[in-house]
Image (cartoon, rainbow, N blue to C red):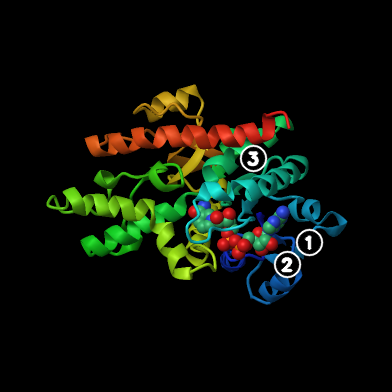
Amino acid sequence: MVKAVVLGAAGGIGQPLSLLLKASPLVSALALYDIVNTPGVAADLSHIATPSKTEGFLPPDDGLAKALTGADVVVIPAGVPRKPGMTRDDLFKINAGIVRDLATGIAKTCPKAFVLVISNPVNSTVPIVAEVLKKHSVFDPKRLFGVTTLDVVRASTFVGEITKTDPQQVVIPVVGGHSGVTIVPLLSQSSAPLPSSFAGAELDALIHRIQFGGDEVVKAKDGAGSATLSMAYAGAEFALKVIRAAKGEKGIIAPTYVYLDDAAKSLVGNGVDVDFFSTNVELGPDGVKEIKSLGSLTDKEKALVAAAIPELKTNIEKGVAFINAPK
Ligand code: NAI
């Protein structure tokens, strides 16, 4: 039995993400929480002929606690998205408080759940969740994940187009964080190798497209938000990987933004000395089973990792300070 909970379930990501979780036979109960509209979304989804019982919750009458009771997996896409010209960090002011309050609910009601954070800026919101869980003495670094899967999905799509390969078969680790230069695609490790002639400006343009792919969507939506459908696809893909691994399936490896202790930092190598970093992780019954090394990097990739570190440090410190600094 697996109970999945979506916090922010009535939003642009929340609705299609809830649909994909409802469609999965791996989920046996689905709780949808938002500050608006979840009764309608839940009623709609509940007519789909799959096993999971679907319920919607709103803030009154302890709706958050009711939604979270018995949760195994909590996915968080709550908060405001970007508009043209905004960076993910511009969202911090609003989303940091939203994520803090939702994390407090998780700490009190379902401290053992796997927590998957989609709300931006992910580089800071994941440390916020960690600090809240620590304050309640329930932080388990194996169970907290920043969802960077959309960067991985984009890399597979773009490289599939270039190499004329089925994008679903293209595996590329995308490491670092989830914003601009902190997004580091390890194209030299692509399962569909790029032609050796693919270098210089062409390679730079591909790296830039993976790092700033979100901006293409923000621009095209022209004020109506950021990626929602591709994010829902990516979020469901990652959530279902976590669930499959929890149910005992072996060998599931995916990049995700996780806490690194000192041993993990030295394993990841390449000068990575930050407390949170996205790297390939083997998933298991208890969440993170093994944090993988970045493997062998080209000089260009080493430079990209080095360029990601300072911004990641700032983003992480900002999240930690939001919870711990005296108000
Ligand atoms: P949206 O505005 O369409 O939906 C957000 C939902 O959160 C709304 O339904 C809103 O009512 C709800 N919400 C607000 N405060 C809440 C609270 N306190 N408790 C529960 N729900 C609350 O936004 P969208 O497009 O779904 O994006 C959501 C977040 O996901 C944004 O922060 C966005 O930047 C982020 N995102 C992350 C990506 C990633 O790769 N990790 C990719 C794309 C977006």
Disc 2 to disc 1, how far (Cα)? 7 Å
Q: Which residue is mark 3?
A: 129
Distance (Cα) linking label 2 and label 3: 23 Å
> Who's the residue at 24% across and 38% down the image?
300
Give me the residue at 69% from left, 43% from top.
Answer: 100
Which x, y percent locates residue 185?
33, 46
> Farthest residue toward the right?
61
The answer to which image quadrant residue 239 occupies is bottom right
**Amino acid at the residue labelled 1:** Leu
Q: Residue furthest left?
A: 197
Residue at the outermost front position: 85
Dot 1 falls on a residue whose secondary structure is loop
Image position, residue 25 (x, y; %): 58, 64
**If the picture is divided into quarters, which one holds ligand 1?**
bottom right
Residue under label 1, please give it: 58
Name the element at disc 3: helix
Q: Which residue is mark 2?
A: 38
In the depicted structure, whether residue 59 falls above or below residue 124 = below
Whole-angstrom CA distance, mark 1 to mark 3, is 21 Å
Can residue 9 be seen in the rendering of this structure?
no
Q: Amino acid at mark 3?
A: Val
**Local crowd size for mark 1, using a 10 Å CA cut-off: few (<14), some (14–19), many (≥20):** some
Q: Amino acid at mark 2?
A: Thr
- Disc 3 under 8 Å from ligand 1? The reply is no
- Mark 2 and mark 1 lie on one chain; the one further toward the N terminus is 2
Q: Are the residues flagged by discs 2 and 1 in contact, CB closer than 8 Å?
A: yes
